[in-house]
Image (cartoon, coloured by chain):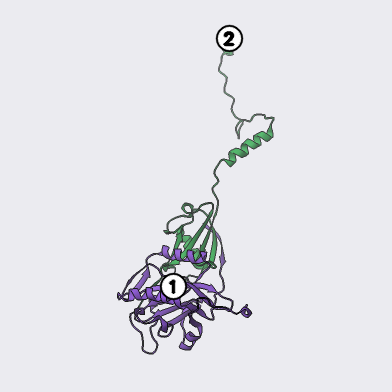
């Protein structure tokens, strides 16, 4: 019996409740540096983007919005800010392309900034 | 709430006391308008320039857009074209000053051609006040040397088009033949 007891499997050490096991370290500065480097390697997603919507060089509105904001929401805000009375006749152009209402800013913005132009298609008729 | 905040930059609308148009630029625009007119189609074009020291505006360029037109209607072919025009003007530090478009007829004998409802909401490149609109009769098949006589001139004030009376047109829309128009130093 005595011999059997010696070979009984021992349960694995469990991490203390509430966290992973830690080890004592002597170089705290190196540890902090490694942690900072790992954090910096994770691409940051901006919480907001800044969209400048302009009609002319002197008339514009700067809108701060979340990346999931739709073009339709930007359009509505810009038309209010820039006092556009007939928004159904206007369109937002970004990067030389007419945008679609359902598009979200995430797909248009680079480096957290975007400039759009609020334009209409001039027309005349007798 | 996807939109966090907005910061608007609106500049007070200018009121240009006079609009100076070089004859050479006017003739260039007129030929563009007339070309469509000779085919029985309307046409639209724009004048651009800069505010000058005496509260007036000097036309420095014209914009001849790509349009789709028939006998009673004309429109630019795309929104992207408008954006390109405005980007270019901004890069040149010029601003849109006047739209010119043609009508097939001469309008009333006394008052000349008038803005239609389409013209009211459609002719301008930008929503600003202070800009002008000219309606040219008979598809611009007449002479540009009579302009602005025989045409009708509007100015946008408080978001609405105001028709200028004949004497006001004579006073405020000045076609000049000089290549360089000198502004007196004392006006600064």
Residue nearest the observer in this picture, B92 or A38: B92
Give the answer, above or below, for where B7 lies relative to B102: above
Residue in front for this viewpoint, B93 or B145: B145
Q: Residues within 10 Å of mark 1 (few under 14, many from 20)?
A: many
The image quadrant of residue A41 is: top right
Badge 1 element: strand
Please say if A66 is above or below A124.
above
In the image, residue A62 above or below residue B18 = above
| Res. B46 mark | 1
Residue displayed at 42% across by 64% down: B81
Q: Colour of chain A?
A: green
Rendered-image quadrant of the C terminus of chain A: bottom left
From the top left corner, tell me how far across and down residue B160 is, in percent.
47, 78
Circles 1 and 2, Cβ within 8 Å, touching? The answer is no
Q: Residue at x 66, y 34 (%)?
A: A30
Query: Going 49% across and 60% down the picture, which residue do you hit?
Result: A116
* Chain B drawing hue: purple
Regarding mark 2 in the picture, which secondary structure is present there? helix
Badge 2: residue crowd in 10 Å (few <14, some 14–19, many ≥20): few
Lateral position of residue A23 relative to residue B12, left or right: right
């Amino acid at each position: 019996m005595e011999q059997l007891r010696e070979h009984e499997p021992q349960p694995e050490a469990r991490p203390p409740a509430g966290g992973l096991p830690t080890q004592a370290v002597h170089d705290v500065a190196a540890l902090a540096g490694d942690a900072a480097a790992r954090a910096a390697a994770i691409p940051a997603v901006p919480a907001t983007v800044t969209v400048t919507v302009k009609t002319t060089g002197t008339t514009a509105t700067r809108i701060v919005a979340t990346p999931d904001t739709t073009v339709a929401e930007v359009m509505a805000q810009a038309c209010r800010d820039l006092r556009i009375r007939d928004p159904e006749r206007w369109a937002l152009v970004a990067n030389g392309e007419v945008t679609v209402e359902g598009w979200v800013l995430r797909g248009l913005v680079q480096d957290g900034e975007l400039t759009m132009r609020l334009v209409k298609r001039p027309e005349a008729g007798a | 709430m996807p939109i966090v905040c907005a910061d608007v930059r609106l500049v007070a609308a200018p009121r240009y006391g006079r609009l100076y148009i070089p004859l050479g630029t006017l003739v260039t625009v007129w030929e563009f308008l007339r070309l469509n007119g000779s085919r029985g189609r309307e046409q639209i074009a724009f004048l651009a320039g800069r505010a000058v020291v005496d509260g007036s505006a000097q036309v420095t360029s014209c914009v001849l857009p790509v349009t789709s037109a028939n006998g009673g209607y004309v429109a630019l072919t795309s929104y992207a074209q408008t954006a390109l025009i405005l980007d270019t003007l901004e890069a040149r530090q010029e601003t849109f000053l006047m739209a010119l478009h043609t009508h097939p007829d001469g309008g009333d004998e006394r008052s000349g051609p008038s803005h239609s409802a389409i013209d009211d909401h459609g002719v301008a490149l930008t929503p600003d006040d202070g800009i002008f609109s000219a309606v040219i009769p008979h598809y611009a098949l007449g002479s540009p040397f009579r302009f602005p006589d025989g045409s009708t001139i509007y100015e946008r004030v408080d978001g609405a088009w105001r028709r200028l009376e004949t004497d006001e047109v004579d006073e405020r829309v000045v076609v000049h033949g000089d290549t360089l128009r000198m502004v007196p130093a004392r006006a600064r």
